Image: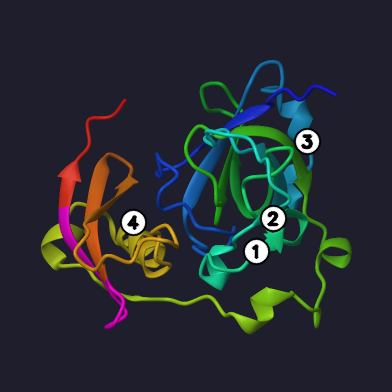
Amino acid sequence: MQLHPIATFRSPLKDKFGIPKQSGLVAALPGSIVFEKPYNNPDYIRGLESFDYVWLLWGFSANAHAAVSPVVRPPRLGGNVKMGVFATRSPYRPNPIGLSSVRLKSIDVTADGAPVLYVEGADLMDGTPIYDIKPYVEYADSHTDVRSGFVDEHPLPQLSVVFPETWQRQFTSDETANIIQLLSLDPRPHYQHDPERIYGMTYKDYDIRFRVDEQEGVVKVLEIVKSFKD
C-alpha cells in the first residue's frame, strides 16, 4: 500500500522541540490544513462543516530514523521504564503514522488554494503531511470511565511559567497564552535535567529561550530572538 499526502499542516511550531506530546493539551493552539492537488476541491469536504472535531492521520516526517526496537521509554515514566511500542504513543513506530483529534474551527473555501481547514489543539509541527481526514463522531469515538494504563498512575506534570511582560509584547494575548501552555508542559527531552542549560523553542518567527528549575517547578523565559529560518 502506498500513501500519498492529501494536505500539509501549517503551524506556528516550526520544529519538533516544543510540540505537545498529545493533541488537545494546548487546546487553543492554532493550525491550518492546506490541501494538495487534486484534493483541493471543495467537494472532498462537503458536509464537514457540520462537525466540531476531526481525526487527522499523518506522518512523523521529522523522525530521522526508523523504529528498530519492540520497546520504548515513555517520557511520562521518566524515560527509565521500557514499554512495548504498541502500548505507547511513541513517534518511533514500525510505520511512522500519527493519529490526532483536533477541533475544527472553520473552513475557508475562498482562500488561495482553497479549501483550508482551520483547527485548534493539534500536536503536529509545521509541514507535517496529512494522509487522511475523518469526522469525529461522539457516539463511536468517545469512551468514558476507561482504563488508560500507566497514564492513570502518572498524571501529566505541569510547571509554572515566568514570562516577563517585556517579552510578551512580541505576541498577541492568544499567542502568549499558547506559549505559556506549551512551556508549562516542559518541552525538554526526558533525559535532560541540567538546571543551567538554556533551551530554545521556535514559535512562528521567534526563538523563545528558557531555563527550567525543576526544584522550584518553574520555567523561566530568558530571551526572545527573531528567527531567520525559511
SS of the residue at dot 4?
helix
Of badges 1 and 4, the one in the foreground is 1
Q: Earlier along the polypeptide chain: callout 4 or callout 3?
A: 3
In the drawing, does residue 169 fall left or right of residue 190? left
The reply to whether the C-beta atoms of the residues labelled 2 and 3 are less than 8 Å apart is: no
Location of mark 1 (residue): 82
Q: Secondary structure at mark 1?
A: loop
Mark 2 residue type? Val
Q: Quadrant of the C terminus?
A: top left
Q: Are marks 1 and 3 in contact (CB under 8 Å)?
A: no
Between the residue at mark 2 and the residue at mark 1, the CA separation in whole angstroms equals: 6 Å
Image disc number at residue 46: 3
Instruction: Give the magenta range.
Output: 213-223
Q: Which quadrant of the figure contains the N terminus? A: top right
Q: Position of residue 90 (x, y in %)?
A: 63, 53
Q: Which residue in the protein does label 2 denote?
A: 71
Q: Are marks 2 and 1 in contact (CB under 8 Å)?
A: yes
Which of disc 3 and disc 2 is earlier in sequence? 3
| Local crowd size for mark 1, using a 10 Å CA cut-off: few (<14), some (14–19), many (≥20) | few
What residue did someone put label 4 on?
175
**Amino acid marked by disc 4:** Glu
Q: Residue at x 48, y 60 (%)?
A: 28
The reply to whether discs 4 and 3 touch (Cβ–Cβ < 8 Å) is no
State the separation of the CA atoms marked 1 and 4: 36 Å
Front position among marks 4 and 3? 4
Q: Secondary structure at mark 2?
A: strand
Q: Residues within 10 Å of mark 3 (few under 14, many from 20)?
A: few
Horizontal side of residue 62 vs 188, given as left or right:
right
